[in-house]
Amino acid sequence: DVEEVGLICVQILERLICSKKLLLEMILKVGKISAEWRFKNGDGKCTKGYEFIPKTMTRCAQILLEEGDVKGLEELFQDFRNNLRNVSGEKKLVLYRCVSAMLDKKKFDEGSDVISLGGVSFGTSFTNKSAGPHPDSVISEVKTAIKDKIEVDWLMPLFLGISWMRKVQ
């Protein structure tokens, strides 16, 4: 399976490369390459015709976030598009995309020490399709992940200090 080979490559890179900067560059490259595996010849079809979990891209996003490479994380999701034929297989990856969008929004709010979710304030800085999901989508994705018993503890610290403009129901 191509995903298993991708994960092995990531593990090898983590063990062989001592330079943090070089490691993060290589992880980003592997993540971008693995993003192509999500679709068959770019036509939007799942590569195996059933739930396909993009383990390598998800692991690359996790490493970039853990190492604090926000620019790398944003670049990984720069041309991201949801695979609507594989929604259930990409749930965790979409959470990382939400984190990337939240961190990107935080950059635009340089004068603020909080991120504002809800309403139009979160999405007004974004001008293209790859800029990230709308705030309602971020909230919806997190709620769905919790309902589906997907591990979200790693994501919750990012919500500390977030100013909610409306109550999540």
Image (spheres, rainbow, N blue to C red):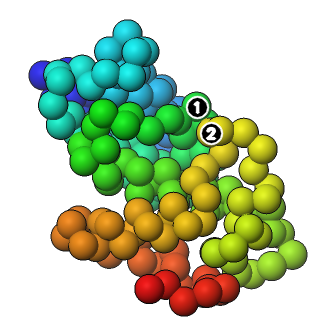
Q: Are marks 1 and 2 in contact (CB under 8 Å)?
A: yes
State the separation of the CA atoms marked 1 and 2. Answer: 5 Å
**Quadrant (top left/top right/bottom left/bottom right) for the N terminus:** top left
Q: Position of residue 141 (x, y in %)?
A: 41, 63
Rendered location of residue 74, percent (x, y): 60, 45
Percent position of residue 106, x then y? 71, 66
**Which is more toward the observer, 24 or 83?**
83
Q: Nearer the viewer, residue 17 or 102?
A: 102
Q: Amino acid at mark 1?
A: Asp
Residue 43 location in percent, x, y?
Answer: 40, 15
Say which residue label 1 marks: 79
In this picture, is 110 found above or below 44? below
Task: Tell me the SS state at disc 1.
Answer: loop
Q: Quadrant of residue 52?
A: top left
Instruction: Give the residue displayed 24% in from the left and 20% down from the top.
Output: 47
Q: Residue at x 33, y 27 (%)?
A: 38
Give the residue at x 39% y 41%.
60
Left or right: residue 71 compared with residue 31: right
Which tag, 1 or 2, sits closer to the chain's start? 1
Q: Which quadrant: the C terminus?
A: bottom left
Residue at (74, 67) in percent of width and height: 120
Q: Is residue 40 above or below residue 108?
A: above
Disc 2 residue type? Ser
Q: Is residue 108 visible?
A: yes
Identify the residue position indicated by label 2 in the image. 130
Q: Quadrant of residue 59?
A: top left
Residue 106 appearing in the image:
no
122 displayed left or right of 145 = right
Count numbered badges in the picture.
Answer: 2
